[in-house]
Amino acid sequence: MAIELRITSGARAGARETFTKSVIAIGRHPMNDLRLDAAKDIDVSGRHAEIRLVGDTATLRDVGSSNGTKVNGQPLVGERALFDGDVIALGGAAGATLEFHFVADTSRPAAPPPTAQASVPPAAESKPAPPRRDTTMRIAEAVEVQTGKLRRMLYIFGAAVIVVGLGLAWLSRRNSAADRATIEALLRELQDQNAAIAQLRGSAGANGLTNEVGRIRQERDSLLTVLRAGGDQQAVTQRIAELNARQTAAGAVSKVDYERIADQNTRAVAFIVVERGESIEGGTGFGITRDGLIVTNRHVVQGADGGAPSRIAVQYHGTRRWVPARIVKVSATDDLAFLRVEAAGPFPTVVGVSPSGGVRPGAPIAIVGFPLGNETAGMGGSIDTVTARATLTAGIVSKSVPDILQVDAYVAHGSSGGPVFDQRGLVVGVVYGGPTEAAGRIVYSVPSDRLIAQLPGEAGGVVKP
């Protein structure tokens, strides 16, 4: 069985795509199966929803989108079955609308024609296609599917309550008073986390925080199940401590003033375009002196063979002016390079660069740059008429070692050379890449300690305690 998704509104309106996969991911991120416009369909999340095909049945599930999903005008809660002709709305007015259809799977080989002697029994004759059901009938069937699932969940929940009650009664007889006190304390701690996590979800305004809060909630529910089933209390206690640390980190992200970080620093972030022969590539850099000294990556301005580009031009955030630049210094040990703008200043600079030695896992960060290059820098259009607009994404530090500052955030090609800011708005790293299989979620950056050690003399004033 195959399905066809017809895009009826949004930037890609009129397009049709056919799928035979068992799971079809939908969203603006390039890794999705049905990719919507990253620049224009802004109400659609990076990973918004997915369709699952099992035999002749299709179901739709929202995977934590920011602006929600509707089917035939009804908000999608949990998972629901899809029927031919259903209309799926992703996000709000700046989102996209799809029409769902079952189609014949043309990738399967056709059955061989019957021989001349063979006769087709009446039962094998083709049947006329059933008439298309109206929207009311399809909504009624969908409601029946959902309520059926709800009834089953209620039956399971009722049975689980009985089992848990019997299990706790048995534990109360089996364990000592000290053991019972330990179990009750752990249960109270997990229930307290439940309320704290609910509060976090209500304040999850930073990109990426919603997904982390969802993972924390799933882990908490898993621990409750293990604990109530009489699992190893010592192991559960350790996992609760780890969960508390992650929740604290998520809470810190939700409290960071990202608007202040953007106001103080974004004007100093520059879109860099490098020309090598007939090839033109883009990247990110940031200003550190008023006379136009810019930090970026070595691989942004230098070819794999070490050759210099034929031309470099930069455009600061919020401007339409392209200014030429030249390479001042290329690091021999780190993916760092320094450019000098060849035009009269003054030019904007970041607030400062802070030593990275004190940065710890769990600390909130922000990355400012141009992921996907010109697609997000100017939201499409000709590079000659673009007005650079940098993108801010939020995340947390996941690992800090002398050579690498690893963060959990989103980057893509074009983000290389972008600054990583701490919650004070000071640079603590310079983005240079990440593993391909991580789909932009594991980000490697050069720690600011390595940057500070290689700053040209005139840039020493950018270092802050």
Image: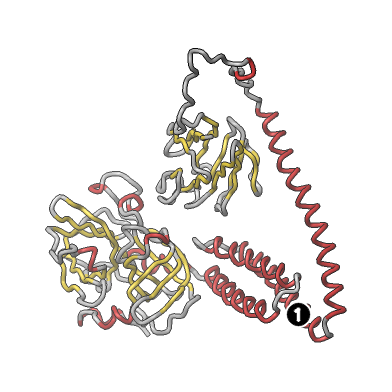
Q: Which color scheme did the rendering employ for the protein?
A: secondary structure
Q: Is residue 1 left or right of residue 175?
A: left
Up-down: is 169 above or below 391? below
Measuring 41% from the left and 48% from the top, which residue is drawn there? 38
Up-down: is 421 above or below 324? below
Seen from the viewer's position, the closer of residues 148 and 378 is: 148
Classify the position of the N terminus by image quarter: top right
Q: Is residue 125 left or right of residue 29?
A: right
Give neighbour class at mark 1: few <14, some 14-19, many 20+ (Cα, 10 Å): few
Q: Is residue 234 left or right of residue 4?
A: right
Number of numbered discs visible in the structure rendering: 1
Seen from the viewer's position, the closer of residues 90 and 158 is: 158
Looking at the rendered structure, the secondary structure element under dot 1 is: helix
Type of amino acid at the residue the image marks with label 1: Ala
Classify the position of the C terminus by image quarter: bottom left
Q: Is residue 240 left or right of residue 312?
A: right
Q: Position of residue 435 (x, y in %)?
A: 37, 64
Q: Position of residue 216 (x, y in %)?
A: 60, 67
Seen from the viewer's position, the closer of residues 4 and 286 is: 4
Q: Residue furthest front?
A: 117
Q: Position of residue 310 (x, y in %)?
A: 12, 58
Q: Name the quadrant containing residue 267.
A: bottom left
Q: Position of residue 368 (x, y in %)?
A: 38, 64
Q: Which residue is mark 1?
A: 185
